[in-house]
Image (tube, rainbow, N blue to C red):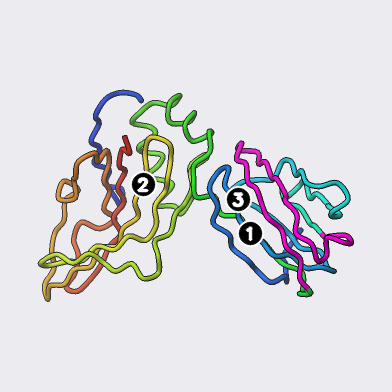
Amino acid sequence: MNKYSLFLFLLGTHFFGQSCFALQTITIADNQTKNITISAHELSRIFVKDDRIQNVRGLEGAYILTKDTLQGQVYIKPTPPYQTKPFNLFITTEKARNFNLFVSAKGISGQDIELKPSTPSKEAELWEKNSDYSQVLIKLITCMINDDVPSGYSVIYPDKKTKAVKYDNFTIKLQKRYLGKHLYGEFLLFQNLLNYPVSLTESMFYQTAARAVTILDSSIPANGQTMLFRVISNE
């Protein structure tokens, strides 16, 4: 028997090695502009989480750019007078995302700049539309369990101040959300508040627009916890 079971609510049939640079993490949506700071005199690295940089455009003569085509990342260093003067950098990725970076240089060490997409790419929509509906749900659940990211999806983490939602006998806290075009997945942490074991079923966590629910452990010990995965339609 599998360690977990999958409960599907089917509604419809369609629809360069290790870096020692200082790290900046920038959450950015497709076609959004964000400020970044690079070193004025050293190389800084720019890369995209779960994607690869395909093309970089900017003001000619404002910077020196080295492309790492193997890793899908770039190294950049400004040239005078742009060591003290900001400029724009336009980035296109392999998954057809577009980012606009407003770049300022300072007298700091080389920077590692991680761009974390907060919106899905077109690849996510194509995968959802062109795949069998039930297989999409199963694949999304499986990816969440394995800490993987489906094609074109974005992973969104809740604010650190987000608290668990408390019910009479348990709490549920969102760990992260996997955002697609028509669907999104939720990774939730279930905490038993009772001093004795409880049994859970997937149907207990059904809600409007839910399409699939999986609980890793159906029997939760006293004050124990388990992981809950849920797929929701965002239409």
- Amino acid under disc 3: Thr
Q: Which residue is mark 3?
A: 33
CA–CA distance between discs 2 and 1? 29 Å
Q: Indicate which label's residue lies in the foreground, 3 or 2.
A: 3
Region rendered in magenta: 77-106
In this rendering, position of residue 235 left or right of residue 21: left
Give the residue at mark 1. Answer: 35
For disc 2, the neighbor class at 10 Å (few under 14, some 14 to 19, many from 20) is many
Label 3 neighbourhood size at 10 Å, few (<14), some (14-19), many (20+)?
A: some
Q: Quadrant of the C terminus?
A: top left
Residue placed most toward the observer, 227 or 13: 13
Q: Amino acid at mark 2?
A: Gly
Q: Is residue 117 magenta?
A: no
Image-quadrant location for residue 41? bottom right
Q: Residues within 10 Å of mark 1 (few under 14, many from 20)?
A: few
Q: Whole-percent x and y of residue 93?
A: 65, 41
Residue at 63 percent across and 59 percent down: it is: 35
Q: Position of residue 8 (x, y in %)?
A: 25, 37
Q: Principal SS element in the magenta part?
A: strand
Q: Give how far apart the Cα atoms at labels 3 and 2 are.
A: 26 Å
Q: Are marks 2 and 1 in contact (CB under 8 Å)?
A: no
Side of 55 where 98 appears, left or right: left
Q: Secondary structure at mark 3?
A: strand
Up-down relation of residue 226 to residue 90 (above or below): below
Disc ID at residue 185: 2
Q: Which mark is residue 109?
A: none
Q: Nearer the viewer, residue 91 or 61?
A: 61
Image point 13% across, 64% down: which residue?
Answer: 198
